[in-house]
């Protein structure tokens, strides 16, 4: 074999591995977010910290992920998506090593904040896939990348629970450190740097303003139940959030190269997918959040199954497998009918899943079926969202736009967590002198999430149709019809390009 042929084979192998390597990175991101969950009940004893301090091992990851996702997305568009992707994976791995080396709660919280940077992996990877893959492969690859969030969460929980149950808790973080190092090495080897860039100076003021506003918002939402929704601290955070984000909005409108292009984000084809992502983040998150508590509730409640954390994780495993298997199906639906239809269908299936949960939440097999149906809808919806964004924004802003979309999902999840906690706190009964949520409270949480998913379906149907989507209408036409349709799409593209130029001129 000649050196030239060997070089071609290596490049070909790297090209074939780009999608699975990026998907592995997305799964790692979701695993890092969930591995600490089985530890939460024991961390106060293991670290000597209070339960309130231990809760920050989750809150810190949420805050840093929400802040860094749009910032790193914008940095990827400007300085290179591969470069920023590797930096995010490296920070995630360093954070995991820090967790493995310490039992000090302050260092653990700092390390978990570093791990939050991995939230930017998915939007950066989706942008790389758009730049590197031919159009006929982009849809299925993006669908798989979007599904990695659910796949990683479904796999991470039982894996972490098994390690925690049968080994020292630091072993869990050594395992994730090793996985992170493997993911980083594979990404460095297999992923090429995208040539698509948007030059200019990074909007540091905009990044700091957005970070401050998001910290105030998410800190208030996540800690409202613990600090009291009417407490001066929470009210002060919400007031500060409004003031900071209002000033940030004005600054972004006046900046030549803003962190977030608000003119572009205000277009219905971008704004409505962002709104739908916010609603879906709320709608889907109640599935895993409430299911885990429901099946672990004591049998003495009359509805609980008394399952261990390992058994609970295994109950969610079918959901992860379903997301993996159905991601190609969602891509085919988007190709045939357009991602808007796939998004609306996914939201409707989520509603159906919650209808099943409300109908019966006592039998384990029905609980698993209902949770799997919700995950099926999540697969369809989450695979369609980035496709809609990719078709609605210029190539130079794909990572930052998808970063904002992921941010909206994160905000939806944070609001869902607070809302579900509020519902369950107000619907309790005493069991052995301890207040536990009632079945009615769980059913109300499902009804609330299903209603929000229904609103997401309505928002998805309101998204303007994509003129560049051929859909099923082009299939079966004559050659002249297809040429006419292609010409129409070309003209639509020119029209949107003229609109972009006009916005830039303004």
Image (cartoon, grey):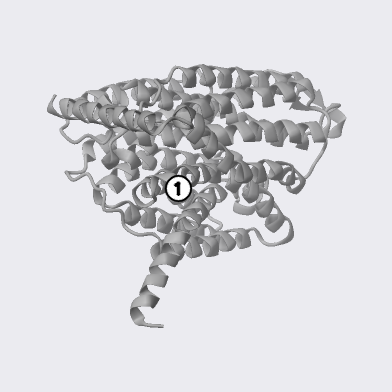
Taking the spot 81% from the left edge, 32% from the top edge, the residue there is 304
Quadrant for the C terminus in the image = top left
Q: Is residue 414 visible?
A: no
What residue sits 22% from the left and 34% below the top? 258
- SS for dot 1: helix
**Between 299 and 355, the one nearer to me in the picture:** 355
Total numbered labels placed on residues in the image: 1
Picture layout, residue 14 above or below residue 62: below
What residue occupies the far bottom of the structure in this picture? 1
Q: Is 229 placed above or below 196 here? A: above
Q: Is residue 390 visible?
A: yes
Residue at 66%, 42% (x, y): give it. Answer: 322
Name the side, left or right, on which 352 lies relative to 439.
Answer: left
Residue occupying the point 76% across, 37% down = 296
- The residue nearer to you, when weighing 408 against 130, is 130
Foreground residue, 79 or 108?
79
Q: Position of residue 438 (x, y in %)?
A: 76, 22
Image quadrant occupied by the N terminus: bottom left
Residue at the far left in the pictured view:
505
In the visual, does 228 lie left or right of 15? right
Question: Tag 1: Cα neighbours inside 10 Å, few (<14), some, or many (≥20)?
Answer: some
Percent across and percent down for residue 476 are 48, 31
Q: Which residue is mark 1?
A: 137
């Amino acid at each position: 074999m000649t050196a030239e042929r060997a070089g071609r084979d290596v490049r070909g192998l790297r090209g074939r591995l780009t999608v699975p390597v990026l998907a592995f990175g997305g799964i790692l991101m979701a695993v890092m977010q969930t591995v600490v969950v089985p530890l939460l009940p024991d961390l106060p004893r293991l670290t000597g910290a209070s339960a309130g301090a231990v809760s920050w091992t989750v809150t810190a990851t949420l805050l840093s992920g929400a802040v860094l996702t749009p910032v790193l997305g914008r940095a990827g568009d400007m300085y290179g998506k591969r470069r920023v992707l590797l930096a995010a994976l490296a920070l995630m791995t360093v954070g995991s090593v820090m967790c493995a080396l310490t039992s000090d709660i302050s260092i653990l919280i700092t390390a978990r904040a570093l791990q939050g940077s991995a939230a930017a992996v998915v939007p950066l990877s989706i942008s790389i896939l758009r730049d590197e893959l031919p159009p006929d492969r982009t849809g299925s690859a993006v669908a798989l990348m979007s599904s990695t969030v659910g796949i990683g969460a479904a796999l991470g929980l039982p894996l972490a629970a098994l390690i925690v149950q049968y080994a020292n808790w630091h072993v869990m973080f050594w395992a994730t450190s090793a996985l992170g190092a493997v993911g980083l090495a594979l990404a460095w080897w297999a992923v090429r740097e995208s040539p698509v860039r948007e030059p200019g100076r990074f909007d540091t003021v905009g990044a700091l303003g957005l970070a401050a506003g998001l910290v105030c918002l998410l800190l208030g939402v996540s800690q409202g139940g613990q600090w009291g929704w009417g407490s001066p601290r929470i009210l002060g955070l919400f007031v500060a959030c409004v003031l900071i984000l209002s000033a940030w909005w004005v600054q972004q409108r006046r900046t030549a190269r803003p962190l977030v292009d608000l003119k572009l984000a205000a277009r219905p084809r971008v704004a409505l997918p962002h709104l739908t992502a916010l609603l879906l983040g709320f709608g889907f998150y109640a599935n895993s959040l409430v299911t885990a508590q429901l099946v672990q509730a004591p049998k003495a409640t009359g509805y609980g199954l008394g399952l261990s954390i390992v058994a609970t994780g295994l109950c969610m495993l079918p959901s992860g497998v379903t997301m993996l298997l159905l991601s190609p199906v969602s891509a085919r639906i988007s190709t045939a009918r357009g991602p808007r239809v796939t998004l609306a269908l996914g939201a409707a299936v989520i509603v159906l899943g919650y209808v099943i949960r409300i109908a019966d939440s006592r039998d384990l097999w029905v609980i698993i079926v209902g949770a799997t149906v919700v995950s099926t809808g999540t697969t369809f919806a989450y695979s369609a969202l980035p496709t809609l964004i990719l078709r609605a924004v210029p190539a130079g802003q794909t990572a930052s736009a998808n970063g904002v979309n992921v941010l909206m999902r994160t905000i939806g999840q944070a609001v869902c967590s607070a809302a579900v906690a509020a519902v369950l706190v107000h619907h309790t009964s005493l069991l052995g002198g301890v207040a536990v949520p009632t079945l009615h409270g769980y059913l109300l949480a499902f009804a609330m999430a299903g209603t929000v998913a229904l609103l997401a379906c309505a928002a998805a149907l309101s998204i303007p149709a994509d003129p560049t989507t051929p859909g099923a209408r082009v299939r079966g036409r004559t050659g002249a019809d297809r040429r006419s349709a292609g010409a129409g799409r070309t003209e639509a593209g020119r029209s949107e390009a003229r609109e972009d130029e006009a916005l830039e001129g303004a």
